[in-house]
Amino acid sequence: MQIPVIAWAVYWIIRLIGPTLRLEIVGVGNAIQIRSSGEPGIGALWHRCIFTAAWVWRNRGVVVMNTVNFDGQWTRRVVERLGFGTAQGSSSRGAVEGLLAMARQIEAGKHVAFTIDGPRGPRYVAKPGPVILARRTGSPISAVHFGLQWAFTFKKSWDLFQVPLPFSGAVMVVAPPIYVPKDGGSDIMKAKQDEMQAALERVRDDAESWFGLDEEQRDELRGRYSGRVPKP
């Protein structure tokens, strides 16, 4: 009985706050590069950013991994109402089935996304799902983070979850895509896992510091994320 009530409340909180956010995308060319190439991408972001990502990526048909526990079930109702698809699985149980389901969605031409340190942490430690999926499908990984000017942070939660306050500024920082060769061995997989971890930390630090920078420093960051990475 709690699941539909919680899902209804969370959905409407997102719908009420989301339209008031003032968003800038840094590294938009990195996101467009994946989209314009005609191939689906694999998004990776920290669990802390779910609220803002759910609003910004709404109604795009992005498929997300969804756990089968209580939190996963009310979350599924929320994101599906916001225009996401879901694939059942988790990092602890059903991970293989979940990755196979995500692979099928990519093969069908859909973008997918992972909250990469979820569902229970440890915080800011990336799990290997996107790297495994990228090797299987050839699709690129896109590390993303959302920084907020004003937000309520759940300081006692494992992920330091953030809910933006109404009319907050927001920034989405997108790293250059990461490609994983389909014939990559264990050494390459380890290197790509480290590359993804580093990219996630970099976009996190840049997005979280954004609203403390002056305009000259912001221009420097915009330039840093404006390059394009050729597909190998």
Image: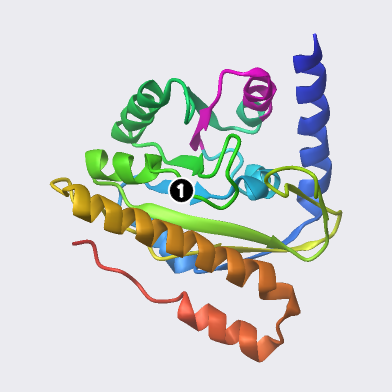
Using a 10 Å C-alpha cutoff, classify the residue at mark 1 as few (fewer than 14 neighbours), some (14 to 19) or many (20 or more): many
Q: In the image, residue 113 lies at what x, y percent?
A: 48, 41
Three-letter code, disc 1: Gly
Which residue lies under the disc numbered 1?
43
Name the colour scheme: rainbow
Q: Is residue 76 magenta?
A: yes
Q: Is residue 85 above or below residue 218?
A: above
Residue drawn at 49 percent across, 38 percent down:
62
Q: Is residue 229 left or right of residue 147?
A: left
Q: Is residue 140 magenta?
A: no
Residue 64 visible, this orientation: yes
Q: In the image, residue 139 lies at what x, y percent?
A: 29, 47
Residue drawn at 61 percent across, 26 percent down:
80
Residue 35 visible, this orientation: no
Q: In the image, residue 213 lies at what x, y percent?
A: 70, 82
Q: Give the position of the N terminus as an image quadrant.
A: top right
- Residue reaching furthest top? 1
Residue 142, picture quadrant: bottom left
- Residue reaching furthest left? 183
Q: How many callouts does the rendering have?
A: 1
Q: Is residue 26 left or right of residue 187?
A: right
Q: In the image, residue 131 lies at what x, y percent?
A: 33, 46
Q: Is residue 134 left or right of residue 153?
A: left
Q: Secondary structure at mark 1?
A: strand
- Residue reaching furthest bottom? 216
Residue drawn at 32 percent across, 39 percent down:
133
Q: Give the position of the C terminus as an image quadrant.
A: bottom left
User: Foreground: 229 or 1?
Assistant: 1
User: Foreground: 95 or 75?
Assistant: 95
Q: Which residues are magenta?
A: 61-78
User: Foreground: 188 or 29?
Assistant: 188
Residue 215, picture quadrant: bottom right
